[in-house]
Structure formats: C-alpha cells, structure tokens
Image (cartoon, rainbow, N blue to C red):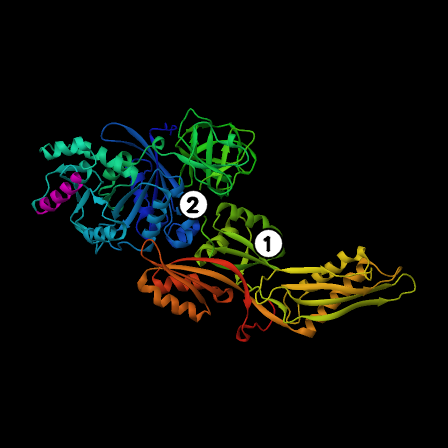
C-alpha cells in the first residue's frame, strides 16, 4: 500500500460503549473495502483489531488497534482511512483518549438495542473536549429489539438537537435490509453481499423521510444567505450540495449526522464509508497542537503559530499538516511485539518521514533512526516507504520514544504533544513475584508495561510494589501481559494501608551512650524536647529539627549526627510499629568527650532519646485519607452520599456540574477505598465518574486500628 498524500488520508477513531459493535463494524468496513479477505467474528476471536489473547479470551477490546483501507468515493476520489478501534470498557478509557487525540473524526458507535449507556457519554464528552468532529452510527439494527427512533430520541436528549439523522432504517431486526437516504430521498436496498441498488422509497416511509429531509435542509441552508434565498424561492439544493454543507458544519461541530448500519449483514456499510470520506475533515483543515519548551521561544517548528494557551510548562502552538514542512511526529502508543520488539504507533504532524531518517525525540532527547515504516492492519505490518503529514502508521525499535512524545529533525529544544489530562488511577493491587527470577526481572518488565500504558502507575509502599490503574480488569490484563509478553509471573493482593504514628504530646527526654572498651570508647549525651510538629493537623511526612545548644555542650561537628539520629528513630517506627511523622525535635543541651565522642555516638544517643520520648508521651495512629470526587446523575446522589457516609467519608462540597449532574467532594480514609470504584459502578449502573487524590493523613479511630503493622 502506497503512502497516502496529506489530502487523501483521514484518521477515524471508532469509539463508544463496550458491546456497541465497534469491532464488528470496523471488521465490516475493512472487508467491504477489500482490505481483508473475510470478515472475522468477535465470538471466534478472528477479528483484525481484537487480536491480543487477553481480548480474545474476554470477547472485548482492551487496547487501541489500527486498521487501514482505501476507498473510491462516488465522485471518483480515492481516500485512505485509518480506523482506530478503541475499547469501550471504562478500565481502558485511556486508549480511547489516545485514539481521539490523533483523530480527524470520531465515529461514535451506538447500539440500536442498548441506546445511550455511560460509555457513549464518556466517548462523546472526550471528543467534545478535544474538539474532534463527530458522526454517530446506530448499529446492530439487525438484532432483536432494535429501535432506531427510540435511540435517536435518547441521543438528542443526551447531546442536543444538533444531531441530524441523514439515514433511516427501512425495517428493523431481521427485516433490516434497506435504508432511506434522507438527503437524496431514495432507498438503498442491500443484498446478502452488502451491495446496494437504489429504489423509490416505500409508501409507508415517504412522509417520515420527507419531514426529516426538510428539517435537515432548512438547518443547512439557514447558515448561507444565498442558499437560503434560493430555497425560499423554491429551488431545492442538490444532495451533493447538502453533503458539502453538512461536511462544513461537521468540521465546526455545529452538526452531528446520525446514520445507520449493521456490521453483521453489512447493510449500510458502503454508504457509511462514503460518508466518512466525505464528512471527515482533511488533516489540512485541523491543526495539531504541541507544547514547546518555555525557555526558548524559537523551539516552535516553522509553520506554527502561538495559540495563547498554556499547556503546562511551556507554550502551546498549532502545527499545520504541511508535507513541505519540517518533520514532526507524534508517538501516540507503544506496544511490545514478541517477534519485532517495541512497535511505536505514530502520526506525522508535519513534513514527510521516510525509512532511514534520523530524528531526535524532542521530549526525551533520544536520537532515533527510523528502521522501517509500515501501516498496521491489526497485528499485520504493511510496509510503507514514507508517511506524509496527516498519515498514521508505525515504526519498530524506537526505544527512546515512549507514548506521548514527539520526534523532530532539530538537534536541540524541547516539545511534547498537547494531550488531554491523564486519567487518575482509582484501583490498586500489590504485586508479589512468584520466584527469585521473577523478582529480578520484575522492575524492568513493569517499566516497559507502564511505558505501553500511561494510565498504569507504579508505586512503592515500604517493601510492597503497587500497581495502580482504572479498575480490576485493567490490572488483571496488565498482570496477564506481564506473564505472557515479559515472562514475569506475579501474585496480586490488597494494597497495604500506609499507617503512620506521631507523638501525642510534647515531652523531654535524655539520650545517652556510654561505652568503654579498653581503647577509644563511645560517649554522647543529648537533652531533647520532642513534640508534635503541627497544632491540630498532620502532614504525615513533616519533620523539624531545632538546634538550641549554647556554650558548646554539643560540639558543632556533631549537630548533623544528632539530626540523623532523630530521623533514624522516626524511620524505625514508634511503639505501635509504624513510621513516625510530624515530629519536632529540639536539642538544647548535652555532653561530649574530647576522645570518646563521635558522630556515631551522638546519632545512637539521639535515636535512643527520641524513642524514649515516644514511649513516655505515647503516640497517635494516623491513617491516609484521600479527596474523592464523584460526578453522578442527580437521581443517584442520595445513594452515593449514603455510601460515602458508610465509608467514614466527610462530604465537603456538593455542587451542580455544567452538564446538570451532581458533583460530590468528600474526604475518605484510604482503607475504605480498596474496591470503591467497583462498588460505585455497581451502585450507579456505571454512570458515575470518579477521581481519587491523596489528601494527607488524619487521626485514625480506635476501631480502624490494624492488629499488626503492614
């Protein structure tokens, strides 16, 4: 397959709720275009885009996969479409974000049976936030209980009246074999091979179709004074003119077409491909955005302009998809192939990239050589000699270029893609290697796993290795890939709660070391005041050391050893067995010996003095707490508040979000949040959004005290 020119190529993100039929529809599109010899089935594990063993076993998409097709449009123009099939499961929403970040158009797939579940709303809101134009396709029209008109009403209620049906099913369920073209006002009747011929509309559909035709036509001509005058004069615009005007409004987000298709019978699939080619904006019509280093304003590539936005630490600029510009490449996903090694999915934002080009990673600073370019048909690699601005493809062995980085031809400067905020982890598990060999190889394998999927976060809690993600399925799949791809086997368990303790009140203590061994001995005495660092609050990490010694009772060269001794005692743990935090230690007096005193002596003496102070004053057990934000439809607000109360949560705010949902903010002990994301999905039918952020420590009630330290 030859590299497509910038004007020919379109990248379409196929998004929607899990089970809506995205992969089946993608398979039908590829097959109808002749890109694959036969359409596979999700049930058989034979589809192009669901090719990983973990996906086949579960029967759902778990990662972003690409498929490529070439299509000749009715006007003779040839287009190349890259379909980015994204998962709909909430645990893998990060892959959907990635697909939309490189898309020219979002194809929102909605089931004619299931309607508009939470996954559809998530896909819609993400596409809207990223400014990606949308087309809605109602699929699974061939299934029992399919109801296009009910789903259309749900879509308009959820997303607005600017959703315009430009196709209607003529018959549903088993009788779905034809569609009405609302713009052209005729019927497309399909055979068993997914090919159609035109017929007049059946009498029972004429009135409904014509009403929709008038509604869409009036909406489109209302934005053009010349067309509006002609229409009011009785001159009806041709279907081709209406499609051109519709494409303009799709690009600006003013209109979202709704079409209909079946991935199983291929009814409407060829028409859908035509519309994707006609309605998807060309890459030249939508600039990409990158963030360049703030230190040097000359970092921006030629052909960019300042957007005025601040993307974080740097300046956000727009990049035109110009094949004559300097090369600029977005690495948007990396995966490990057991045979090839690392495969980097990429989109060329500017210029032309060829095999053997040498580029520099503008984000990491690594020098890279493009060993080979190819397009992806699922796991199949189709060689491509070059990729131009707007093209999506892949390259192998770019080891210094993780997901979310940029390649360019410059030898200096820094830049990174402008990406949506990363989704915060809400579920965690501890990992225990199955053997000594697994233990040795686990750090490197986990680093590569996290590089593949930025929504995975690696953490350490004492001696425990903790993997955090978006849900239990997310982590289960990660552990399976860890074993299959990297050969590292682990057992998972609950995450230990990071309890701490602090001194209950201020006290004084003496620490001393007196040891004679025939030669040089060990001698040190310190007088300490030890107390809480904060008055009524906890930082769970704070420490203050104060030197109040006068007259040289403790020589200056030993003061740093005194501070180290205090830190040693805190790390060793208090009377309850947990690390000590939020301590103020003041040394105000002491004794030394000109021969027998040493750094070690004062360090040991201070540690003993701090431990004595903790035993004398007693300690308070602290537990980690988190700020939990739940955004939920109002009818679930009461149930969520009751559940948070049962988890010892303290609600600090309830407010109305812009979309009419309730936003609840509470402080909840982390010990109560181990399975909260799973329970919340069950409680709200998956309609809640959740973020969890650490918020420090609070005093633990007696009933929450663990029996043994973790």
Residue that carries the numbered disc 2 in the rendered image? 420
Q: Residue furthest right?
A: 518
Q: Secondary structure at mark 2?
A: loop
Q: Is residue 610 above or below residue 27?
A: below
Q: Which residues are magenta?
A: 204-218
- On screen, residue 706 versus residue 274, left or right, reads right
- Label at residue 708: none
Among the two numbered marks 2 and 1 on one chain, the one whose residue lies closer to the N terminus: 2
- On screen, residue 581 versus residue 649, left or right, reads right
Q: Is residue 392 above or below residue 22?
A: above
Q: Residue furthest left?
A: 203
**Which residue appears at 71% of the width and 60% of the height?**
546
The number of discs equals 2
Residue 16 rendering spot, x and y as whole percentages? 33, 49
Residue 690 rendering spot, x and y as whole percentages? 41, 58
Residue 590 rendering spot, x and y as whole percentages? 80, 65
- Would residue 274 be visible to someone looking at this image? no
Q: Is residue 387 on the magenta stretch?
A: no
Residue 226 rendering spot, x and y as whole percentages? 17, 30
- On screen, residue 209 versus residue 348, left or right, reads left
**Which residue appears at 43% of the width and 71% of the height?**
646
Q: Residues within 10 Å of mark 1 (few under 14, many from 20)?
A: some
**The C terminus is located in which quarter?**
bottom right
Residue that carries the numbered disc 1 in the rendered image? 438
Q: Is residue 207 on the magenta stretch?
A: yes
Q: Main secondary structure of the magenta part?
A: helix
Q: Secondary structure at mark 1?
A: helix
**The N terminus is located in which quarter?**
top left
- Would residue 644 be visible to someone looking at this image? yes
Q: CA distance from mark 2 to mark 1?
A: 35 Å
In front here: 525 or 132?
Answer: 525
């Amino acid at each position: 397959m030859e590299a497509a020119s910038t004007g020919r190529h379109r990248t379409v993100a196929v998004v929607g709720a899990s089970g809506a039929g995205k992969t089946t529809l993608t398979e039908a599109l590829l097959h109808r275009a002749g890109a694959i010899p036969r359409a596979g089935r999700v049930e058989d594990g034979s589809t192009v885009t669901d090719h990983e063993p973990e996906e086949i076993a579960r029967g759902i998409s778990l990662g972003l996969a690409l498929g490529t097709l070439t299509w000749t449009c009715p006007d003779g123009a040839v287009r190349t479409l890259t379909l980015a099939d994204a998962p709909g499961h909430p645990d893998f929403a990060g892959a959907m974000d990635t697909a939309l970040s490189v898309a020219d158009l979002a194809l929102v797939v909605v089931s004619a049976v299931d309607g508009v579940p939470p996954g559809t709303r998530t896909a819609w809101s993400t596409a809207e936030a990223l400014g990606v134009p949308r087309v809605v396709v109602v699929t699974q029209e061939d299934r029992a209980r399919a109801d296009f008109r009910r789903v259309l009403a749900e879509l308009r209620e959820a997303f607005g009246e600017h959703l315009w049906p430009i196709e209607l099913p003529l018959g549903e369920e088993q009788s779905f074999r034809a569609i009405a073209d609302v713009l052209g006002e005729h019927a497309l009747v399909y055979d068993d091979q997914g090919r159609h011929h035109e017929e007049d509309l059946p009498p029972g559909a004429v009135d409904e179709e014509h009403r929709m035709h008038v509604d869409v036509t009036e909406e489109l001509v209302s934005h053009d004074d010349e067309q509006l005058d002609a229409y009011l004069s009785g001159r009806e615009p041709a279907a081709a003119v209406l499609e051109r005007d519709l494409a303009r409004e799709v690009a600006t987000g003013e209109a979202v077409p709704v079409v209909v298709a079946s991935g199983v019978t291929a009814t409407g699939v060829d028409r859908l491909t035509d519309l994707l080619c006609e309605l998807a904006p060309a890459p030249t019509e939508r600039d990409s955005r990158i963030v360049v280093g703030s230190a040097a304003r000359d970092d921006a590539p030629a052909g960019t302009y300042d957007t005025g936005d601040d993307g974080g630490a740097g300046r956000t600029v727009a990049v035109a998809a110009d094949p004559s510009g300097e090369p600029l490449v977005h690495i948007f996903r990396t995966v490990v192939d057991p045979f090839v090694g690392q495969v980097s999915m990429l989109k060329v934002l500017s210029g032309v990239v060829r095999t053997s080009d040498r580029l520099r990673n503008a984000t990491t600073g690594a020098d890279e050589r493009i060993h080979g370019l190819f397009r992806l048909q699922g796991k199949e690699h189709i060689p491509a000699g070059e990729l131009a601005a707007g093209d999506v493809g892949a390259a192998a062995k770019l080891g210094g270029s993780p997901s979310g980085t940029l390649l360019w031809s410059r030898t200096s400067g820094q830049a990174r893609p402008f990406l949506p905020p990363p989704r915060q982890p809400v579920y965690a598990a501890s990992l225990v290697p199955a053997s000594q060999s697994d233990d040795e190889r686990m750090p490197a394998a986990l680093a590569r796993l996290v590089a593949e999927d930025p929504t995975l976060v690696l953490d350490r809690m004492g001696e425990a290795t903790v993997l955090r993600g978006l849900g239990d399925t997310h982590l289960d799949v990660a552990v399976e890939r860890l074993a299959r791809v990297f050969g590292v086997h682990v057992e998972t368990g609950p995450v230990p709660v990071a309890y701490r303790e602090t001194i209950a009140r201020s006290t004084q203590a003496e620490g001393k070391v007196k040891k004679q061994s025939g030669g040089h001995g060990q001698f040190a005495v310190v007088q300490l005041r030890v107390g809480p660092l904060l008055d009524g609050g906890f930082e769970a990490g704070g420490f203050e050391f104060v030197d109040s010694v006068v007259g040289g009772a403790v020589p200056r060269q030993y003061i740093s050893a005194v501070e180290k001794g205090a830190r040693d005692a805190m790390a060793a743990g208090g009377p309850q067995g947990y690390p000590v935090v939020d301590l103020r230690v003041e040394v105000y007096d002491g004794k030394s010996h000109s021969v027998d005193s040493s750094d070690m002596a004062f360090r040991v003496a201070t540690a003993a003095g701090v431990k004595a102070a903790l035993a004398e004053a007693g300690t308070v057990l602290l537990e980690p707490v988190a700020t939990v934000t739940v955004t939920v439809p109002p009818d679930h607000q009461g149930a969520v508040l009751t559940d948070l109360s049962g988890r010892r949560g303290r609600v600090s705010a309830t407010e109305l979000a812009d979309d009419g949902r309730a936003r609840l903010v509470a402080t909840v002990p982390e010990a109560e949040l181990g399975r909260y994301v799973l329970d919340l999905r069950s409680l709200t039918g998956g309609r809640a959004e959740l973020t969890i952020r650490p918020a420090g420590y609070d005093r633990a009630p007696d009933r929450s005290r663990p029996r043994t330290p973790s």
